[in-house]
Amino acid sequence: MVEIEKWTGLISSSFLKNGRVVEWLDKGTQYLLQWFKSIPDLNIIFFSMNVFDLIINDKEQVLFNDIFLDEANRQKFEQLIKEHKYIDELSQYGLPVNNKILLHGNSGCGKTMTAKAIANTLGKNILILNLSNVVCSRIGETSQNIKQVFDKAGREKAVLFLDEFDQIGKARGNDDKDVGEMRRLVNTLIQLIDYYPEKALLLCATNHPEIIDTALLRRFQLRINFEMPIPEVLDQYYNRLLSRFPIELQNIERKYNISFAEAKDYTFTLVKSELIKELEEKQKIVKV
């Protein structure tokens, strides 16, 4: 096997003689193709990284009325949705719409569900970045992967949702390792966000806004905080979760000072336990 690396560090590509290229080649290496083709009996098949491998396939449909928000946040998101519904009318007055939003706060408090609900309400596709596939050890390839997803979202006028945004937007210089690579990645993100089309929507979520690069934070027109739900809101959430079950399974002890995600897991665990007990009792009666 021969390995060829572009000296700029953008791409590493390997190929087998009379075989095939098994890794992605950037457009910047196209000049190498002519050289490859000049080699007798060298058959090379090139593959590009499939953008769909960089996106999580999540088809869940969430209604805006099904998400639990405090009144202040609900008003902010309703305003955001209305801006995008009337984007053409607003543009006639030279009024830009907000399309770069940072969602921050406690984990499990509805950031992802809110992003899905906004996309559904606006009739837009939602593209959720798959961090496990996007982040690459090769210098520059993470930036290239993210650019592919941004380009796709822009073309489709979609909602692009970047969860765990702090993992790719960490402040430059915070990590002694790969400082140069992190700086390049943040610089790429700044440029992608600056030129993100107005008719597409960018939603980024983080539990740790304090470690995000300040230059990135300045790009967001709205920063919306998700706090732990108060008991009254959690009670409404418990009521909705339990409404699908028989009355005898709804009388569970409720926990508070937890997130929506924790409340859901807790509720379903208790309901399953009670249901299994009932099923086991029925089996005992049948055996008798």
Image (cartoon, rainbow, N blue to C red):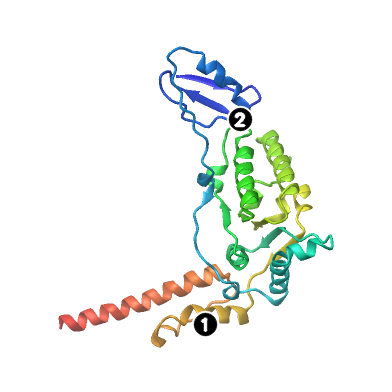
Circle 2 SS class? helix
**Residue 164 x/y as whole percent:** 61, 53
The quarter of the image holding the C terminus is: bottom left
Total numbered circles: 2
Circle 1 SS class? helix
Residue 218, compared with residue 226, is above or below; it is above
Q: Nearer the viewer, residue 192 or 68?
A: 192
Query: Measuring 44% from the left and 80% from the top, which residue is drawn there?
Result: 244
> Mark 2 or 1 closer to N-term?
2
Identify the residue under disc 2. 27
Decide: few, some or many residues near mark 2? Use Cα within 10 Å; few <14, some 14-19, many ≥20. few
Mark identifier at residue 25: none
Identity of the amino acid at label 2? Lys
Residue 5, compared with residue 240, is above or below; it is above
Query: Measuring 77% from the left and 52% from the top, which residue is drawn there?
Result: 219
In the figure, is residue 216 to the left or right of 31?
A: right
**Residue 72 x/y as whole percent:** 73, 74
The quarter of the image holding the N terminus is: top left
Identify the residue under disc 1. 239
Residue furthest top in the image: 40
Decide: few, some or many residues near mark 1? Use Cα within 10 Å; few <14, some 14-19, many ≥20. few
In the figure, is residue 284 to the left or right of 162?
A: left
Residue furthest bottom in the image: 247
**Residue 204 x/y as whole percent:** 66, 56
Residue 74 found in image quarter: bottom right
Residue 100, compared with residue 175, is above or below; it is below
Q: Nearer the viewer, residue 10 or 238?
A: 10
Identity of the amino acid at label 1? Asn
Residue furthest left in the image: 288
Foreground: disc 2 or disc 1: 2
In the figure, is residue 131 to the left or right of 226?
A: left
Q: Nearer the viewer, residue 58 or 170?
A: 58
